[in-house]
Amino acid sequence: MLTGAVLILIFPSICQTLQISLPDTSYQCDMVMGKVEPPTTVYVNGKPCAVSARGYFVIGVPRSNKKDILVWSKTSRQKASKIVRVLAYRWQIQRIDGLPNAYVNPSRENIKRIRNDNQKVRSIRLAMANLVPLFLNNGFTAPVKGPITGVFGSHRILNGKPRSPHQGVDFAAPMNTPVYCPADGIFRLAARNRYLMGNTLMIDHGLGVQSIFMHLNHILVKEGDVVKQGAVIGRVGKSGRATGPQLHWGLSVGTILVDPARLLN
């Protein structure tokens, strides 16, 4: 018995239980934060998940997700698991009329442009270039001072025709209204004249979390710039497929799109 007591004092980590800090429930298109004691490997539904040096990791819940999320964590000595129950979200319907037909039914040439634009965005989202969760410094704030005119995930009917769900949040604001960086990050894309997106910015907030801004009139940063929350990064415009001056803000975890408005509360 004495030997056992001595071993507990010398090797306390052997007797500690591996734990995963996660919420018990989430909604479709939530961004879920988790925490483990490093060094620990984390798997989400069987796939490896990036973990920061301090043990933070992020899960994006897909819009179509109908199953609970299984999270595994392991060290060289222990394993642990946790199930996050996923709740269905009630999506709105948004009708937008008056768009030029070329943006609703693009030509074959413009479809190719759209695919190339989307592939560039996807490749940046897949890169996972920064494993430091910069967004934890101060959280997220709204990038524009203006009303929300388009909510995330809504079923979109453009000129009477059903199209893909909305992939971000739209803010209405006058032309050239300042656009502020919503959270600390590194700029990975500063692109102009994208067919649907118009003038576009992408910010890497760390651990696969990235913001995208569309329809800008002016871009005031360049790729590689490290920017703090609150810095002016652009000006509101109506470039690309936009009915008027607005800012589209999208947020993703890897390639999974999540609702940025939920992070503002």
Image (spheres, grey):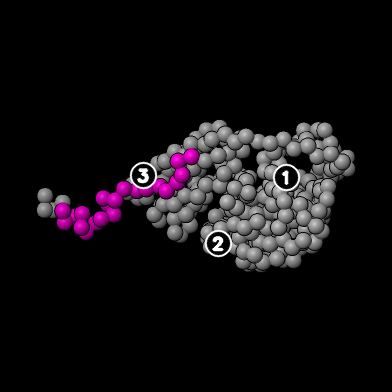
Q: What residue is pinned by disc 3?
A: 79
Pick out the residue farthest to the front.
Answer: 147
Cα separation, mark 3 vs mark 1, equals: 43 Å
> Could you classify mark 1 by the number of other residues whose Cα lies within 10 Å: few (under 14), some (14-19), or many (20 or more)?
many
Q: What residue is pinned by disc 1?
A: 150
Cα separation, mark 1 vs mark 2, equals: 25 Å
Q: What residue is pinned by disc 2?
A: 138
Q: Secondary structure at mark 1?
A: strand
Q: Secondary structure at mark 2?
A: loop
Residue 143 highlighted magenta (yes or no): no
Q: Is residue 14 left or right of residue 191?
A: left
Q: Secondary structure at mark 3?
A: strand
Q: Earlier in the sequence, mark 1 or mark 2?
A: 2
Q: Label 2 is placed on what type of residue?
A: Asn
Q: Which residues are magenta?
A: 5-25
Cα separation, mark 3 vs mark 2, equals: 32 Å
